[in-house]
Image (tube, helix red, strand yellow):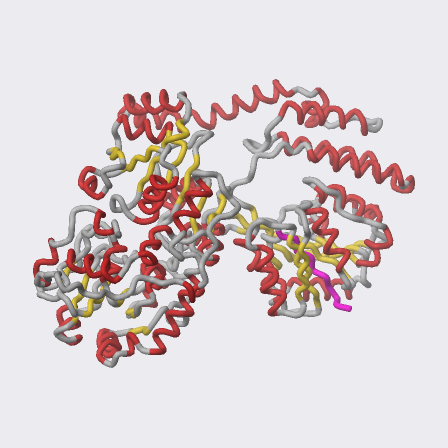
Amino acid sequence: MPRFSVIVPAYQVQAYLTESLRSVLTQSYDDLELIAVDDCSPDACGAIIDEFAAEDRRVVAVHLPANGGLGPARNAGIARATGDYLIFLDGDDTLVPGALQAITDRLKETGGPDVLVHDHARTYWTGESVRGGVVAPLTEEGPAAFQLANRPALLTTLLAAWNKAYRREFIEREGLTFPPGRHADIAWAYPVLMTAGTIATLDRVCVRDRRHRTARERTHLDLFAQYDRVFAFLDERPELARWRPVLHRRMLDHFAALAATEGQMSRRAEFFRRARAHHRRYRTPGAARLRHALLRLGAHRTYLTLRAARQLRCHAGRLTAGLGRLARTAALRLHYRVQRQLPVRSDRAVFAAHGGYAGDPAAIEEKVRELVPRVRTAWLVEPALQHTVPTGTRRLRPGTFGYWTALARSRYLVTNTALPLAKRPGQLLLQTHPGTPLKSVGLDLLDRPAAAGPADIARLLDDADTWDFSLSANRHSTLVREKAFPAGFTTLEYGHPRNDVFQRATAADVARLRETLGIPEGYTTVLYAPTRRDYRRSHYLPLALERVVRCLGPRFVLLTRAHPGYGEPLPHAPHPRIIDVSAHPSVETLCLASDALVTDYSSLMFDYANLDRPIVIHCDDQPAYEAARGTYFDLRAFPPGAVARTEDELIDIFTSDHWRGSRSSQLRTAFRTRFCPYDDGQAAERVVRHVFLGETAGLPVPLPQEERRPAPRPVFLPHQTHPAPARAATAYGESREALSLD
């Protein structure tokens, strides 16, 4: 029999569940069982729980057949518990290090009470952590163990299930269970404290309660049913009647606190009416507090008037500051507002991406025209990049009337960047993202000012609030983004549509693409694509490219692609076998045309792995890069191929053939298995069928890795002619037609 049964219910908390479970299993006091309850969660919670159960015998996995809510999930955990004491932890919260040791020490000191109450800290999305607040009732002075009558101030602490430890025999003897519905902790905590024979306190933070940046709008109407259950519990136990007036006051305090919240309560008028009814139903003789007056009178309109006046004062300064900006764009803004009053067009879709017609949005737009021809598509693009857009797609220049009309009235919005719109009801926005995150993103940049400042992060989070769907290629991306961008989007773990072309291109297609780039027949082509350094304003170029291509030999060609954020090519002296492709509109074409990739921390490696061609990592500035930007895993410990720390090591990897040896192949296979489970050539179809056709069942099942046939290296056609490499800087075409594969 373990000392503790830690019960963790999980529902749609996949981004936080691993951290929560690990915080329990890594406690210094390990005499425990961890009962993880999958409340029929539609995300990866169940799989995460099973993985922990397979790795640690202390984990008990419970899978419920249907979603019942927090209370029933906790009851399912109680039914499986065998420990002396029960501890509850929400799936997005964590135990602080040493918490269980402190709790068991205090239980011994106080003679094993029925209930031990400890403190908690609220951890906000900004990283700030604040202690729970009401500390005085948790003092450890006085009797080691007591009853509630000796310290009634405990009822002013947070009445949550997870800030206490409960003797299991006491819970079973009293027949205490969690009710269904929201605010279930109310109908649990009051009966627990009022019936406990002995209570003890621990003046220490043991739980970190995660406070999310955004919360769904709540009616809070379930609260009334929970208080009905508490008063019914008192009616069944006459010996507890003395707590009725105390409970009545605490109920009104709770109602008043919720009524004061801004923007978190809908159906406020109904809330006031029901609060008034509860006040009358359960009141006891005696004067009520003045701060309960609005609730007692049901003065909903008076409350709204006072609230509006307060909001007007708060926002007056902001409105004044915004008038100047609105005046400069009055005509377009007025047009946009008028368009927003008109119906959303269900047959219109708008697409946008970095670098013109490219990436996942381009692949999805192409598939929409194939599978949903009734939908008319438009592409938001700067004039300099309009040539990249296919002729069948409408081009819209940013800042024009047509641009704002499309943003205001199109049903579907697909982008891998931020769109300047106030998304309206009836619109669906799909964020496809630039790629799999190796570098820190979103909230994880809070302590990295070289990469992003507070204003940048605020804009990122405001943009995330507009997402309905977030595209993901693997579980790593899913978990990182759901935690780094706390918003209400739905993750579509379908793969990257832009990589579909890697599975359908033929050797002849690849040869034709190489010809457009000016790569001679028989040459080994290496694509060099380093990423941006946040700690530098200019290019970071650790390689002498002329020396590298000279040392590799006369049959090597080097394609160099600078990060788009720099807006200029990589600096190097002219060389006949160095081709600058920084301005090429399609990175997928460059991947198909190359025989190998050399990069550092670029997310391009995750896409390139789908081709099953060699990848070499060159990273000589890891300490500086980690300090400025940070990564989610150590690339040198789990690389997609050989790793070089210096220019000489990079040259040696190629001249010794390690770049395409068996060890490189093994590393690439493991990397592809982890990060490319869905990139099977059908990602675009899965996305379009879900988002545009509303299909969630019967989508194409991802092909196993062993059944995929990525584009092979080129087979040169006898009729082809091959220009000299020196022409290649301007040889590639002016559109994405090179990717229109037969």
Residue 201, how many percent across, how many down? Answer: 74, 55
**The quadrant where residue 263 appears:** top right
10 vs 455, left or right, is right
Residue at 41 percent of width and 26 percent of height: 344
> Front-most of 161 and 637?
637
Residue 361, how many percent across, how many down? Answer: 34, 44
**The quadrant where residue 227 appears:** top right
- Above or below for 720 versus 388: below
The verdict on residue 567 being magenta is no
Q: Main secondary structure of the magenta part?
A: strand
Residue at 34 percent of width and 66 percent of height: 612
Residue 740, how many percent across, how many down? Answer: 25, 49
364 vs 307, left or right, is left
Residue 374, how many percent across, how many down? Answer: 37, 32
Where, quadrant-wise, is the N terminus in this rendering? bottom right
List the single residue furthest toward the bottom: 656
Residue at 66 percent of width and 19 percent of height: 299
List the single residue furthest toward the front: 718
Q: Is residue 122 visible?
A: no
- Above or below for 700 versus 351: below
Magenta-drawn segment: 1-10
Residue at 44 percent of width and 65 percent of height: 673
> Front-most of 33 and 443?
33
